[in-house]
Image (cartoon, grey):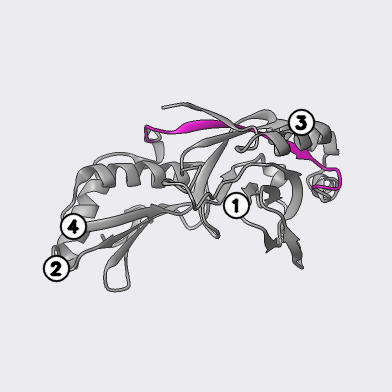
Amino acid sequence: MPVTPETPKWPVIQGIGVDGFLITFNDSLTEAANRAALAFRAALDGAGLCGVEETSTSLASVYLRFDLRAVDHETLRAALAALLQQADWYAAPLPTGRKLWRVPAVFGTALAPQLKEAASLAGLSPDQAIAEFCAHPLRVQAIGFAPGQPYLGQLPPQWDIPRQTGLTPRVPEGALAVAIRQMVLFSVSTPTGWRHVGQTALRLFQPDQPDPFILRPGDEVQLVPVTRAEFENIRQSDALGGATSQAVA
């Protein structure tokens, strides 16, 4: 659909490679754009459009891969445009089948040494920072960067803090790190430019299981603060890191 001064800029449909489309709902992360991406992907999966073989979401867009033997670009683009017209995706309900996860986390201590630094950048004390991290469930906005790794958010505006100028050489699996109004819960041990503020014992990526990813886009994560001693007990005694879940939709 061409963009004119009289039409909204978003969403935009773009061809990606020879067999893909990207439907973008904004050029930056907002709650509404993330909601739109999640809701539209669910509708796309349910629409059964001819030739669509795979879909996925990022923070504010939906990607699909299709079979060129089953449908051509023009036909599929028209079908996507028609589906976009069926709802206000920015205000659409979130998909069904989502879960609320309660995840114990220890904040600060030697396990998560950058809490004080991150809190200071947000203009808060460490205790205030922990309270804000745990005040409300955080949406799994997207899975990416590493297998099963969620981007969680959005945090309040004061957490629009930058990444570090350098890299932390390695944070462990289960680390919670913060930047740009989001938290990442690391599924593997990795270098990062985000500040390490909390630690969980949750194994998000379990390749030996039939379903290797614990979280899905649209799920919610409620962080539950625990002491270092409680965390160590959980880590030693609970294969799921003390996490529990329930259906929310």
Q: What is the span of residues highlighted in magenta in the rendered image?
A: 95-111
Which sits in the foreground, 45 or 110?
110
- Point out the tag, 2 or 1, that comes first from the N-terminus: 2
Q: Is residue 69 above or below residue 228?
A: below
Q: Which residue is mark 2?
A: 69
Secondary structure of the residue carrying tag 2 is loop
Question: Could you tell me how far apart the alpha carbons at marks 1 and 4 are, in whole angstroms?
Answer: 38 Å
Crowd tier of the residue under label 1, counting other residues whose Cα lies within 10 Å: few below 14, some 14–19, many 20 or above: many
N-terminal-most mark, 3 or 4 = 4
- Real-space CA distance between mark 2 and mark 4, rounded to the nearest whole angstrom: 17 Å
Give the alpha-carbon distance from disc 3 to disc 1, as whole Å.
20 Å
Q: Give the residue type at disc 1.
A: Ser
The answer to whether marks 3 and 4 mark residues whose Cβ atoms lie closer than 8 Å is no
Question: Disc 3 vs disc 2: Cβ atoms closer than 8 Å?
Answer: no
Tell me whether circle 3 and circle 1 mark residues in contact (CB < 8 Å): no
Alpha carbons under labels 3 and 2: distance apart: 54 Å
Name the residue carrying label 3: 226
Residue marked by disc 1? 187
Q: Return the mark for residue 164.
A: none
In the figure, 216 relative to 171: above or below? above
The kind of residue on which mark 2 rests is Arg
Q: Secondary structure at mark 1?
A: loop
Q: Quadrant of residue 97?
A: top left
Q: Name the residue tied to disc 4.
A: 78
Instruction: Kindly identify the amino acid type of the residue bearing the numbered disc 4.
Output: Ala
Circle 3 residues within 10 Å: few <14, some 14–19, many ≥20: some
Q: Nearer the viewer, residue 187 or 239?
A: 239
Choose mark 2 or mark 1, whichever is in front: 1
Identify the mark nearer the N-term, 2 or 4: 2
Residue 236 in sight: yes
Q: Is residue 165 above or below residue 41?
A: below
